[in-house]
């Protein structure tokens, strides 16, 4: 019997993926979250609902539009794609070409039991923890408990059922008068409620009372941050701490809504950066004890009055920040964080120095400066687009105007801060309505000031790209628009 070879060190692991024979499919609404991974992993393909690159990204398969039930979530999109005849034929054809019953592997942004069943029927193995486990740890209430077990503190809080204003006042008597209430699940900005009085509570009473338990937090003056990591049998690999753009009205209609990131080491003190790495490592090790393994992201809140770091929430998956993490200088020097996720689920043994890797990735000299903006339709007016700015490299002139230079699907093609990589989400024919995703801009340098306000350059990019959307008013958007324009969080 041949002894299975152990991959030793980053060089061995990189070579393993460059020689990969097994098809790996990223099934999602767009390919944004794992942009560029196909260039690190042989036989990696994107299967998407939205064709952001108009057929010009060589490793992306987008089936034709067919009738379907209205989509209410990303999970609906994934289930639809895995049952789409063209997708089924595509996966099976590639399996026949390899003369294998094993059709390959599947990874997702979001998925549920429907996707697991469909993947199994196609002969695909899902390379993520089960949807049931992911849902359990994704619960914001459960995240607090996992953090407590790991020794990672949350903002002072109480976990309790709340059926009335009196319940809320009773449960929060040690937290002050200004409160933040979160329900267990929901996208950024949609299920976080800021409550100062009974009138504020009344606005959200029905949603709060419907939950068996909510997280009630003391209101703090804070700044958001994000960090991505991957827990493996060798230990938890931790990326750098990133700033978050949150709630800017130019970008999102949602108060508290995520709308971008920066990777910039000097945005945080060395002490905060190191504490974030330590907390994330501890949390990752606890996640493994909970049965979870692979890629995850933590949001941290920095208390500006006390310079303390608190756990915000867990995303047990890749996220909208994954493109920043997987394209940073440290990732190109070693390999993208997501490859460690694939490695963990591969049927291979591996060894690497986890402490050395984490130290290297935490070194500010290995962190270059990049930013991304996620631009949504912020108006309550509903329109239909007749033209939209195409994916590619855009340039900002000295007068602040922006223009398309050429098509490209590599963000590394951005050479200066006067250039940006724009990934179009909404296209001509799609509908713009409150919350619809228009696209994502990735550029070099910072887009926020030291006071965490948008820079003039950021505003120039936002205004300039919006100006290239041409639209006509309509009475209301049909249900189909909810995926065509990305009306729910597709990132």
Image (cartoon, rainbow, N blue to C red):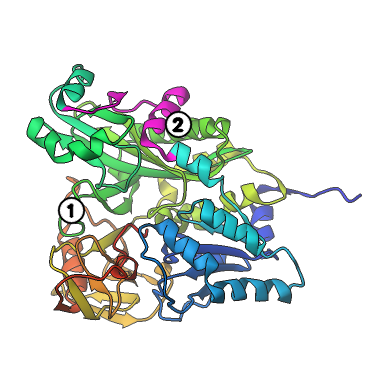
- Residue 96 placement, left or right of 372: right
Q: In this view, does 368 lie to the left or right of 188?
A: right
Residue 202 lies, with reference to residue 336, above or below; the image says: above
What label sits on residue 248 in the rendered view? 1
| Crowd around label 2: few <14 · some 14–19 · many ≥20 (10 Å) | some
Asked if the magenta segment contains residue 52, the reply would be: no
Q: Could you say where residue 367 lies in the image, as x and y percent from the top left?
A: 41, 50
Mark 1: give few (<14), some (14-19) or many (20+) Cα within 10 Å: some
Query: Which residue, as the protein is rendered here, is positioned at the far right?
Result: 1
Comparing labels 2 and 1, the label whose residue is closer to the camera: 1
Q: Does 146 sit left or right of 473 as displayed?
A: right
Q: Position of residue 362 (x, y in %)?
A: 45, 42
The stretch drawn in magenta includes residue 159: yes
Q: Could you tell whether 346 is left or right of 236 in the image?
A: right
Total label count?
A: 2
Query: Of the numbered discs in the image, which one, if any, rests on residue 487?
Result: none
Asked whether the viewer can see residue 311, the reply is yes
Quarter where residue 203 is shown: top left
Q: Which residue is drawn at 19% across and 18% down?
A: 170
Q: Is residue 304 visible?
A: no
Which residue is depicted at the point 21% across and 38% down?
206
Residue 153 to residue 457: above or below: above
Number of the label disc, if any, that sits on residue 278: 2
Closer-to-camera residue (429/259): 429
- Above or below, 235 against 150 in this view is below
Secondary structure of the residue carrying numbered label 2? helix
- Image vertical order of residue 45 relative to residue 132, above or below: below
For label 1, the SS is: loop
Between 104 and 198, the residue placed more toward the observer is 198
The magenta segment: 138-164
């Amino acid at each position: 019997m041949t002894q299975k070879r152990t991959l030793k060190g980053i060089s061995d692991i990189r070579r393993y993926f460059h020689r990969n024979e097994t098809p790996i499919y990223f099934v999602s609404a767009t390919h944004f979250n794992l942009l560029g991974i196909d260039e690190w992993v042989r036989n990696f393909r994107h299967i998407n609902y939205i064709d952001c690159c108009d057929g010009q990204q060589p490793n992306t398969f987008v089936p034709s539009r067919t009738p379907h039930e209205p989509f209410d979530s990303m999970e609906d999109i994934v289930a639809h794609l895995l049952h789409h005849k063209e997708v089924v034929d595509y996966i099976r054809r590639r399996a026949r070409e390899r003369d294998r019953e094993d059709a390959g592997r599947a990874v997702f942004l979001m998925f549920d039991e429907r996707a697991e069943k469909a993947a199994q029927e196609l002969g695909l193995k899902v390379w993520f923890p089960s949807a049931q486990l992911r849902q359990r740890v994704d619960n914001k209430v459960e995240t607090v408990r996992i953090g407590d077990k790991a020794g990672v503190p949350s903002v002072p809080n109480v976990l309790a059922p709340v059926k009335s204003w009196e319940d809320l006042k009773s449960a929060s008597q040690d937290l002050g008068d200004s409160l933040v209430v979160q329900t267990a699940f929901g996208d950024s900005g949609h299920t976080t409620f800021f409550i100062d009085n009974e009138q504020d509570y009344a606005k959200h009473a029905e949603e709060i009372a419907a939950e068996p338990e909510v997280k009630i937090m003391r209101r703090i003056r804070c700044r958001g941050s994000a960090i991505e990591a991957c827990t493996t049998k060798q230990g938890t690999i931790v990326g750098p701490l990133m700033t978050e753009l949150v709630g800017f009205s130019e970008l999102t209609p949602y108060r508290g809504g995520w709308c971008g990131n920066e990777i910039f080491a000097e945005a945080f003190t060395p002490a905060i950066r190191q504490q974030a790495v330590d907390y994330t490592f501890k949390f990752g090790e606890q996640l493994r004890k909970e049965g979870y393994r692979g890629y995850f992201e933590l949001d941290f809140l920095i208390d500006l009055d006390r310079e303390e770091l608190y756990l915000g929430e867990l995303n047990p998956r890749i996220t909208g920040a994954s493109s920043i993490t997987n394209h940073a200088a440290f990732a190109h020097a070693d390999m993208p964080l997501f490859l460690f996720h694939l490695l963990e689920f591969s049927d291979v043994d591996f060894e690497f120095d986890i402490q050395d890797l984490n130290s290297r990735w935490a070194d500010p000299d290995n962190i270059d400066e990049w930013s991304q903006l996620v631009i949504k339709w912020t108006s309550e007016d509903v329109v239909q687009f007749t033209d939209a700015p195409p994916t590619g490299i855009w340039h900002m002139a000295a007068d602040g105007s922006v223009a398309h230079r050429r098509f490209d699907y590599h963000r590394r093609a951005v050479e200066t801060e006067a250039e940006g990589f724009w990934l179009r989400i909404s296209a001509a024919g799609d509908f713009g309505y409150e919350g619809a995703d228009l696209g994502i801009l990735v550029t070099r340098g910072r887009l926020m000031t030291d006071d965490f306000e948008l820079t003039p350059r950021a505003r120039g990019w936002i205004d300039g790209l919006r100006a290239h959307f041409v639209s006509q008013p309509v009475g209301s958007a049909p249900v189909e628009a909810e995926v065509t324009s990305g009306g729910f969080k597709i990132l």
